[in-house]
Image (tube, rainbow, N blue to C red):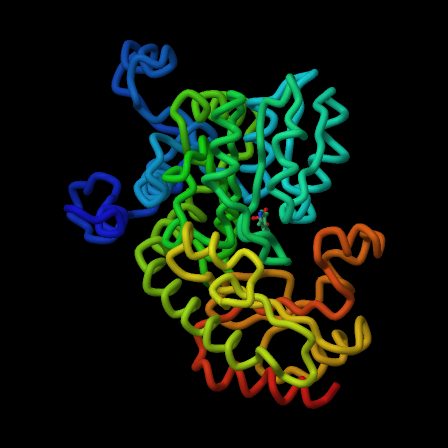
Amino acid sequence: MKYRITKAIRKQVDRTNEMEHSAPLFLTSSFCFDNAEEMRAAFADESDDNIYSRFSNPNVQEFIDRICLLEGAEAGFATASGMSAVFASFMALLKNGDHLLSCNAIFGSTHTVITKYLPKYGIEYSYFPVDKPEEWEALIRPNTKMIYVETPTNPGLEIIDLERISALAKKHNIILNVDNCFATPVCQQPINFGADLVVHSATKWLDGQGRVLGGVVVGRKDLIKEIFLFCRSTGPSLSPFNAWILSKSVETLEVRMERHASNALFLAEKLEGHQKINWVKYPFLSSHPQHAVAKKQMSDGGGIVCFEVKGGVEAGRKFLDSLQILSLTANLGDTRSIASHPGSTTHAKLTEAERQTVGITPGLIRISVGLENREDILDDILQALNQI
Ligand SMILES: Cc1ncc(COP(=O)(O)O)c(C=O)c1O
């Protein structure tokens, strides 16, 4: 097998005596041993035998192996949600006195972890502006241990040059940790550009059907070992059932993402220049400020399109109320298209100034473009725009 997608699709837990084709569900909390010696060896890390599903489980391992193949990673660990993957990657690798440098446009809960919880453990943080790469290096401190980036960012779709940030991380011997949730490994492989770790909210495109929560972190073996040891004791493990769902979803990830991305590009192109819209943002639109970087590191533009309706918060709310097909829900990365208005929902708790800094303007609308017929998605958006 030459191709990583084929390898990821074909990778599967060993077939049982039942000769099943699809992987069975190993819904078990613990695993048995034939004798005391085997049990001792497993506990002494002298064998890879499963012990307990908080540590490892065949379904969870299959999901991890598939993501490692897609991302080109040495090892991984899967968690109960994207946030537990992010949190574990911080807590396992940072200690009192260390400094975390993160891009300023990040997912809201990650911002909360960084600003509210890391300082409780004596871990310092600062943010770098995603749109001013010339300022990044000056923000590195002698105690900077990790650089954390999201690209594309949620919800503003800023693109960070992975090659540039990883060169800085390497120069200063800092771990580069990339949240690859928006791009998915089908479209972007941060490890190829020098990332040490990649985290995912598997809840989004990896599941792709809005069913289960999950997270995964993959990357350098020595770093994953620390994350595994942290998680094995603290318990944010992925349930075997969710792993079974997520692992199956990996088999259709590439075809789904191709359709999400082509629908998204179609929408972005059709909406650009609309009289009720100030601007449209999509990584593969030539008007995107970091279009060249997006083209360098992504194979398509992903499934999210953002635009700003004229008329601010009220127009944004009116737009959502006028939609007839698209769902109003907090998730993204579903087969069904979703619209959200960050200014009045996910980012409502930020001050106006904080929202402006990360590009969340009052009329910003985020569309997670689904797999419906693209004309139907467009028609729904156009008729809703007509109502404002
Ligand atoms: C970019 C990004 N990272 C992390 C998360 C957190 O994932 P989860 O909701 O699975 O904990 C999200 C959730 O929306 C996200 O969009």
Closer to the camera in the image, 54 or 382: 382
Q: Is residue 363 left or right of residue 232?
A: right
Q: Is residue 122 shown above or below 372?
A: above
Q: Position of residue 272 (x, y in %)?
A: 58, 78
Q: Residue 244 in the image: x percent, y percent?
A: 38, 48
Give percent across and percent down for residue 320: 70, 77
Toward the front, the furthest residue is: 134
At a point 40% along the width and 61% down the height, the residue shown is 300
Report the label total: 0
Seen in the picture, residue 203 relative to 384 is either above or below; the reply is: above
Vertical arrangement, residue 52 with respect to residue 286, above or below: above
Q: Residue at x 51, y 45 (%)?
A: 161
Residue ID at (50%, 38%): 164
The reply, left or right, for residue 62 in relation to residue 272 is: left
Residue nearer the viewer, 324 or 111: 111
Query: With 161 as the anchor, is 354 left or right in this view?
Result: right
Whole-percent x and y of residue 315?
77, 78
